[in-house]
Amino acid sequence: MIEDVIARWHRYMEGRSRDVLDDLLADDVVFYSPVVFTPQRGREVTTQYLLAAADALAGDAAADGPGGAFRYTKQVLAGDTAVLEFETSVAGRYVNGVDIVRCDDAGRIVEFRVMLRPLQAIQAVHEQMGRRLTAGA
């Protein structure tokens, strides 16, 4: 099941269609942000965070060296869980992170957790995400 969910997630990331995202997320999905202590609960708020994150993490296409435009570099799929490692650049800073995704038996994402490194990347992403969420992504 997780293989299909992640294939649909990659399709969402390629086109960023809200319809694809709506079909992927369970009503009671929980989103864990790398910069917000409280888990965000529900499809609507998770959608807002994921849309803002896709924009914020799109990357600096002209960056030299590691980073640049957003791309997944590794994935591990097991049971109902996937770990997707990614790289990008935000505001000229290298960002390395993982998305940890868990799905239910119906093929919907029930948990989405994002982890980032290094500290400068977390700060840059926090700033970009804050702007997008305040503006209504």
Image: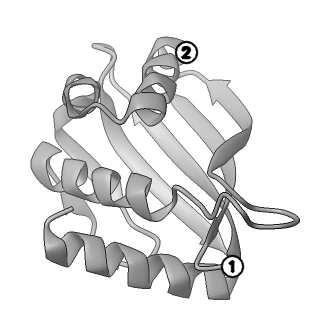
- The picture quadrant where one finds residue 121 is bottom right
Quadrant in the picture for residue 83: top right
Measured as percent of width and height from the top left, residue 134 is found at 17, 78
Nearer to the camera, 24 or 110: 24
Give left or right: position of 9 versus 28: right
Residue that appears at 62% across and 53% down: 98
Which residue, given by chain and number where applicable, does mark 2 sit on? 3
Point 22% across, 22% down: residue? 23
Residue 98 as seen in the image, left or right of residue 57: right
| Residue 34: % across, % down | 47, 71
Where's residue 108, x and y in %? 30, 24
Position of 8 relative to 101 (above/below): above
User: Is residue 34 visible to the viewer in this orientation of the structure?
Assistant: yes
Of the image marks 1 and 2, the number of the one nearer the N terminus: 2
Residue under numbered circle 1: 93
Give the image location of residue 132, x and y in percent: 27, 71
